[in-house]
Image: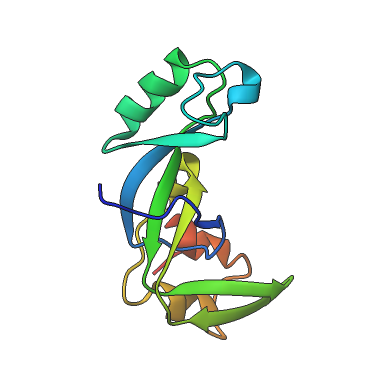
Amino acid sequence: MGAYAALAKAGGGFVWDAVLEYRVWVHPERNGDEPGDGSDFYRAFATHADALAFAKSQVGAEEPLALVLQEEYIDESEPGEYTHVRERRVTEWPVDFLRRPRRTSETIQRFLAPDAPPNRLDILRGTAAS
C-alpha cells in the first residue's frame, strides 16, 4: 500500500501489472460513518480479505475494488478497435477482473496479432491456446 490519489481511472485497459491496494468506498448518505464533511471516502487495505471484512461490517460501504497499476494497456476507443497504449496509469477495477492472468511481455502483442483467436478475450483470460 502506498499514498495513492483518491481519484483514479475506472476500469478498462484489459490487462494489469500489479495490485497496489484494495479500496472500500463508503457513502455517508447510505448511513455510513461520516468523517469530516459527509463526503464519500475510502479505506485502503493490503489484502482483499481485510477489505471484504471491512465492507461487510460498514453500513454504506461498496464491495472492495482493486487499485491496479497498468504499465501498458489496451484501449478500445470503438467496439473492436484496439490500440496498444504504452503509458503508466492507475485504475480501480472490480476484484473479479483479477481472475485474468497478469500481463506478460507477450499478452498485448498476442491480443493484437492478425492471427489472434476469434475471441481475443481468451488471451486475456488465459484460456487461448499458445
**Along the viewing direction, whichever of 27 and 68 lies nearer the viewer:** 27
Relative height, residue 72 to residue 101 (above, below): below
x, y percent for residue 60: 57, 21
Q: Residue at x 37, y 61 (%)?
A: 69
Can residue 90 be seen from the camera position used here?
A: yes
Point 28% across, 35% down: residue: 47
Q: Is residue 65 above or below residue 35?
A: below
* x, y percent for residue 108: 45, 76
Position of residue 22 measured from the top left corner of the image (x, y, whole percent): 37, 40
Residue furthest front as drawn: 37
Residue positioned 34% across, 59% down in the render: 102
Picture quarter containing residue 87?
A: bottom left
Q: Residue at point 52% right, 63% down?
A: 14
Q: How many tags in the picture?
A: 0
* Residue 127 visible to the viewer: no
Question: Up-down: is 8 above or below 78?
Answer: above
Q: Is residue 82 left or right of residue 13?
A: right
Which quadrant: the C terminus?
bottom left
Using the image as rendered, state which of residue 5 and residue 125 is in the foreground: 5
Position of residue 45 in the picture relative to residue 67 (left or right): left
Name the side, left or right, on which 37 lies relative to 105.
right
The type of colouring in the image is rainbow
Nearest to the observer: residue 107 or residue 32:
32
Task: Give coordinates of residue 79: x percent, y percent.
Answer: 74, 70
